[in-house]
Image: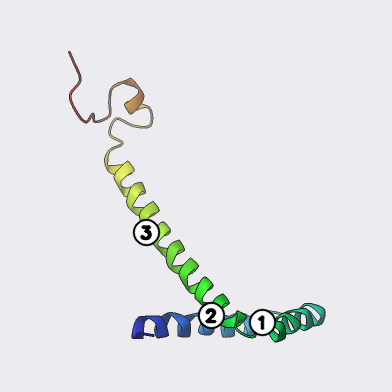
Amino acid sequence: MDRNDQQAIGNLFEKLANVERQTPPRDAEAERFINDQIARQPGAPYYMAQTIVVQEQALNAAQSRIEELEQQAKQSAGGGLLGGLFGGGRRSGSVPR
């Protein structure tokens, strides 16, 4: 495990601690069931943490990409809302005249 992995896992547990402080008591029946499952599969918390960290990184990358595409759309939207439909937008490539 490198420093980035350690930081990502540490951040996950900080978020979990914040959630625990801010939410009502846990559902006792659900907690028993989860604990039973973990007793049967002791490695589950490891794999769950790995899955959550990877999913969070993917969500962050997707959000960055969405923001990038929104900026590109704003920059190339010349001509107003319907400008591109009626020839007001930029064109790429060559178009026969």
Q: Which mark is residue 83?
A: none
Specify whether 83 is left or right of 20. left
Compute the Cα span from label 1 to label 2. 24 Å
Residue carrying label 3: 64
Q: Amino acid at mark 3?
A: Ser
Q: Which mark is residue 15?
A: 2
In the rendered image, residue 19, in percent from the top left (x then y), is placed at: 61, 80
In the rendered image, residue 8, in percent from the top left (x then y), is placed at: 43, 79
Residue carrying label 1: 41
Residue 65 falls in which quadrant of the image?
A: bottom left
Query: At numbered mark 2, what does the secondary structure look like: helix, strand or loop?
Result: helix
Crowd tier of the residue under label 2, counting other residues whose Cα lies within 10 Å: few below 14, some 14–19, many 20 or above: few
What colouring style does the render use? rainbow
The residue under the point 39% across, 52% down is 66
The residue under the point 33% across, 52% down is 68
| Above or below 97: residue 5 | below
Q: How many marks?
A: 3
* On-image quarter of the N terminus: bottom left
